[in-house]
Amino acid sequence: MELGIVGKPNVGKSTFFSAATLAPAQIANYPFTTIEPNRGVAFIRVPCPHVELGKPCAPIHGGCQDGKRFVPVDVLDVAGLVPMAHEGRGLGNKFLDDLRQAAAFIHVVDASGSTDFEGNPVKPGTHDPLEDVRFLEDELAHWVRGILSRDLEKVARRAELEETPIERVLHDRLAGLGVTENQIHTALLEAGMDPRPSKWTAEDALRLSKRILQRGKPMMVAANKADIAPAEAIERLTKEAGTIVVPTAAAYELALRRAAKAGLIAYEPGAPSFRILDPGKLSAEQLAGLKKIEAFLGTHGSTGVQPCIERAGRDLLNLIVVFPVEDETHWTDKKGNVLPDAFLVPRSVTAKDLAFRVHTDLGRGFIRAINARTRMVVGHDYAVQDGDVIKIVAKA
């Protein structure tokens, strides 16, 4: 699963990406700093079952701290989007192509209103951040409509003659976007589309495209620069954006993570506070900066970056975490490592689906699964639950 970090230039996208992943990204106060996409790994925190077991776990990926497991998720930061990007303006075509594999989007918005539509700095409060939310939704919808509309009338007439379900036709056309046939079917119903696609107008196709995006590539808003944005601007975004909105101060989060990595402070991503380890190693300017961040955390509870990543996984994509093991008694792999793996999966995943995700051979040879907590045998259609520890039994 990959999360796409999107937005217009110069709103703090790359700062958000670097703060979430500690991966290097070019950051500057001018448009199109990012040209090639940046890729990194962020983490979603979940309760770790090792606490119940009473033994320390040994994660292969991520880590575990104070009973919280850090489950990795891929993150993509792409070039900034400007109006008319779907027509190739700016780096639009490249931006949109880079986003094809993202399962969901975090739209980073300058909540302080200090960047115009092009990403140029302007006086704070002179640009409406809500307009950025609408503009990006429209750009993405026009992009999808462009894909849908290629020879649509010809394809639609053939589908009608052959009585082929239109969602199947559209799924083939949108295969590169990772949208499922079921999501398209739901979007068709929600958009109130004429059952005869040959009758669709350009406006109909645009309306459908918006619904497909809502179902297949959901988006939330990171109201960035919340440290300088007026409270009423954040409140208006929250009420009117039509999606999840999380106030963020990405620059603060990046400063905290870098300071923690350097051994200057003790800080867990997403925590409401931090602790300075040795004030003598910090300059007066650094101490003053940390004081400002401390005040922000006291008001907001976090910098918002970590909660954004977690809400994208939990609320946008409805993911749960499952811990596959080979020994259901000791919760270990064959080498004796306790709870080595943690998988983020959709809530609807079955035991057999999980087997395929662990390894294709396990899925093909699936016999049964065992719930390691209850020691109960479960079948192929068992819907795994959040936090389950599962052993897969398969043919050798």
Image: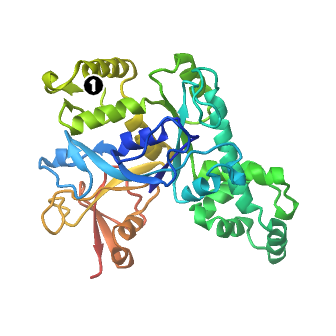
Report x, y in % for residue 262: 20, 37
11 left or right, relative to 314: right
Is residue 347 at all visible to an observer of this figure? no
Q: Residue furthest right?
A: 199
Q: Is 347 located above or below residue 326 in the figure?
A: above
Q: Nearer the viewer, residue 47 or 367?
A: 47
Q: Residue at x 84, y 57 (%)?
A: 200
Position above or below: 9 against 196: above
- Per the image, label 1 sits on a secondary structure element best described as loop
| Residue 10 shown left or right of residue 282 in the figure | right
Residue at 13%, 49% in the rendered image: 56
Q: What amino acid type is highlighted by mark number 1?
A: Ser
- Left or right of residue 200: residue 299: left
- Residue 164 seen anywhere in this rendered image of the structure: yes
| Residue 248 point in image, percent of width and height | 45, 30
Q: How many marks?
A: 1
- Residue 228 or residue 42, whichever sits in front: 228
Instruction: Quadrant for residue 363, please give it.
Output: bottom left
Q: Which residue is mark 1?
A: 273
Find residue 250 and report its image quarter.
Answer: top left
Of 173 and 229, the residue lying toward us: 229
Within 10 Å of disc 1 (Cα), the crowding (few <14, some 14-19, many 20+) is some
Give the residue drawn at x 75%, y 73%.
Answer: 164
Quarter of the image with the C terminus in it: bottom left
Q: How is the image coloured?
A: rainbow
135 vs 159: above or below: above
Q: Residue 74 location in percent, x, y?
A: 40, 54
Residue 1 is drawn in which quadrant? bottom left
Task: Name the residue located 59 percent from the left edge and 66 percent from the top edge.
Answer: 176
Q: Give the x, y percent position of residue 99.
A: 55, 55
**Vertical arrangement, residue 260 with respect to residue 155, above or below:** above
Horizontal side of residue 375 vs 336, given as left or right: right
